[in-house]
Image (tube, rainbow, N blue to C red):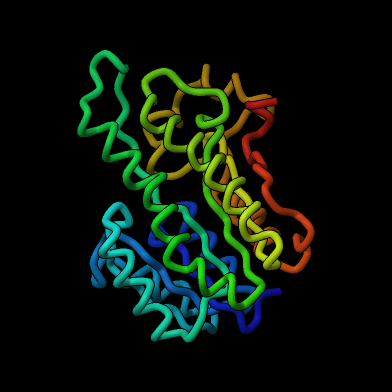
Amino acid sequence: MLKGKIAVVTGGTQGIGLEIAKKYAANGADIAIVDICDAEKAAPACEAVAALGVTCRSYQCNVADAEQVAAVCKQILADFGTVDILVNNAGITRDNLILKMSEADFDAVIGVNLKGAFYMIKQFYRTFMKKRSGKIINISSVSGLFGNPGQANYSASKAGIVGLTKTTAKELASRGVNVNAIAPGFIATSMTTAFQDNDALREAIPMKRFGKPEEVADLALFLASPMSDFITGEVIRVDGGMAM
């Protein structure tokens, strides 16, 4: 479905980001992985993606740093010639109650999760606008839809992604660019390891299980494909019914 397309995936060396990169590669897209880890640590992910028969390159970048993002995006365009799909997946957590949360931890999460997505969109904005086509997919969270105790920074960043998604969608709709968000619930990744043995939490999910990264990647594929050409500005949950 994506043959001949160029996809950029931030936070693409593990978890949901890696599954999205692999899903896109399996459908013919060449992949640029943007991650804070260096080339040596990114190599296994890049090799796994390339093994699917496509070109994959990794780029070290802290997406919270506007100058680093500008340099990396410029290099990606030089290496691949264009960008057709952008997935803003990079994210961190620094959980604590508001009373105990430091300003540094609040700023760090907003910087990566929200400002990082903004910086990436800003750098590729003209490319999408001139092509008059493209797909931007932002990874939000159900925590951004209904909040979560101890996650004021994370919930705020993911709620911000919703607003950023809808605004970008309205700005680029007339140019044929689709911009949507995915709001995962509890997905079995390294970020949720501490919660995966919590029976009470699992019982609170109507489908009584954690999601799989591949299930988020399936939706990301749909949103990157021609099947979603008349869908924009949407926030779609992959949460087993948590936020119903």
Residue at (47, 68) in percent of width and height: 124
With 218 as the anchor, is 162 left or right in this view?
left
Residue at (24, 33) in percent of width and height: 105
With 124 as the anchor, is 169 left or right in this view?
right
Locate residue 116, reporting x and y percent: 37, 52
Q: Is residue 41 above or below residue 238?
A: below
Q: Which of 220 and 74 is in front in this view?
A: 74
Residue 179: name its quadrant. bottom right
Residue at (40, 85) in percent of width and height: 79
Residue 107: name its quadrant. top left
With 132 as the anchor, is 197 left or right in this view?
left
Residue 44: name its quadrant. bottom left
Locate residue 15, reporting x and y percent: 44, 52
Q: Is residue 177 above or below residue 110?
A: below
Residue at (48, 38) in percent of width and height: 160
Q: Quadrant of the N terminus?
A: bottom right
Q: In this view, does 25 lie above or below 61?
A: below
Q: Nearer the viewer, residue 59 or 55?
A: 59
With 182 as the anchor, is 41 left or right in this view?
left
Count of numbered circles on the image = 0
Locate residue 149, reporting x and y percent: 42, 18
In the image, farthest residue toward the top: 99
Q: In which quarter of the image is the C terminus?
A: top right
Locate residue 48, reporting x and y percent: 44, 72
